[in-house]
Amino acid sequence: METLQQDLMNKPVKNLFFHFFFPAVFGMLLMSVNMLLDGIFVGHGVGEIGLAGVNLAAPIFTVILAVSLWISIGGATNFSMAVGEGKVENARSSFTLALAIFIGLLGIISVVGYINKETVATWLGANEETLAPTTEYLRILFSLGWILGLQQLLTIFIRNDGRPTLGMVSLGVTAIVNILLNYIFIFKFELGVYGAGLATVLAGAVGVAIFIPHFFKKQVVLNKLAMAWSKQLATRILAIGFPSLLAESGAFVLVVGYNLSVVATLGTDGVTAFSVINYLHGFMFLAFFGIETAMQPMISYYHGAKKKLQMQETIALAEKTAIGLGLTLFVIGYVFAPSLVRLFGVNDSAIIELAVVGIRLFFICYLFIGISFVYMTYFQSVGKVWSATAIILCRSYVFFLVYLFVLPKILGINGIWLSMPIAELTMAILIVLIVRKRV
């Protein structure tokens, strides 16, 4: 506890930012590797129909992650503010209450979803070809997917408790175990898409186990539990974390919207092409959540400690980092698109052509998406929930859905791929012209 407070009070902002940033980004990328690996193994070991089925089920993984981020970012923000104010028992209560809320919400989702998994598969766009693999993957997500959400929640709290590298280690081990189990379950036991899902959640359980020793260390805040819960604390956790729920749920809207658009326009070939894009996007997109989880402990602590100059320096660093990250991801997508598609075992030339064009157009969004994340995170980390919510609603729902409806009628299939990039560009312009001047 004392080490964390001394670091936040005394270390230069730049050093602290990258101390949190690199483990956060690598940790998020390693988390998304789990879904990416499922796609690669399913594409090679099951085939293109299996790949499409896993993609159709993927929004439920997004729902699990969204709930986890909602509760963990809300609880961890309150945790760091309390540490900044010197209220250690309040910080501990934020963790235990967040954990209790998470267990309750994921329990409800798991039971209801499992009972209705075939109906959910149909809602997600599964047809006669893809219903069976979609349902199989949903079976494992609804029964054991909560493990992945728990790993994410613990990663965020432990990062706020001063050990960002431990989260990265946990997720790195998870990725390695996932590779081994995917190979065994798909190629040796021939369990298909069910095996891919089972590999992911069992690997996540190993990652959770790595966190256990943290709670027995003397120098951390979370070495004791506190149950000073209240309705006010629960409301605060849910309110502060709400923008993160909206942001990750926006990914759900994106996947379902794109799936419905491409299946109506191009059929199963279109869904398979988008499967590749979506797997890659899931991998890239979480890198920007890494910026969020790097900023949040610093901004929340500085806000609690009333250190405005350090807050402004953190925002400036985050802006530059987000722009650099976005440019790097765009170049990777544009240059290596054909190789990235082949990575998934896609052999149909028509699907390859669709996916390559889609990647090069869709990845334009990474040039602008970081600006939204920086300012959403700032407002969320200081408790200005409505400002953060407005940014997320505009970029992920209003602008995206309007462009997804309008652009395909003007540009055809390219209009589908460009819907998200233009939505991100619109939001970035509004932030630079209006929001940025008020911070």
Image (spheres, rainbow, N blue to C red):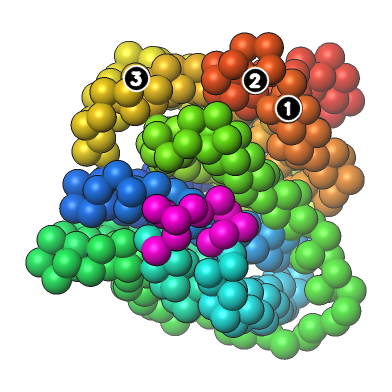
Residue 254 vs 41, above or below: the answer is above
- Camera-nearest residue between 199 and 305: 199
Residue 66 vs 351, above or below: the answer is below
The residue furthest front is 128
The residue furthest bottom is 227
Residue 175 vs 92, above or below: the answer is above
Q: Is residue 431 magenta?
A: no
Does any portion of residue 305 appear in the rendered image? no
Label 2: which secondary element: helix
Q: Mark 3 points at which residue?
A: 353
Give me the C-alpha separation between circle 3 and circle 2. Answer: 18 Å
Does any portion of residue 430 appear in the rendered image? yes
- Camera-nearest residue between 302 and 342: 342
Which quadrant, please, contains the C terminus?
top right
Give me the C-alpha separation between circle 1 and circle 3. Answer: 23 Å
Residue 405 image label? 1
Q: What residue type is labelled 1?
A: Phe
Looking at the rendering, the stretch of residues picked out in magenta corresponds to 121-132
Q: Which residue is drawn at 47% across and 78% down?
A: 143
Q: What residue type is labelled 2?
A: Pro
Q: In which quarter of the image is residue 184?
A: bottom left
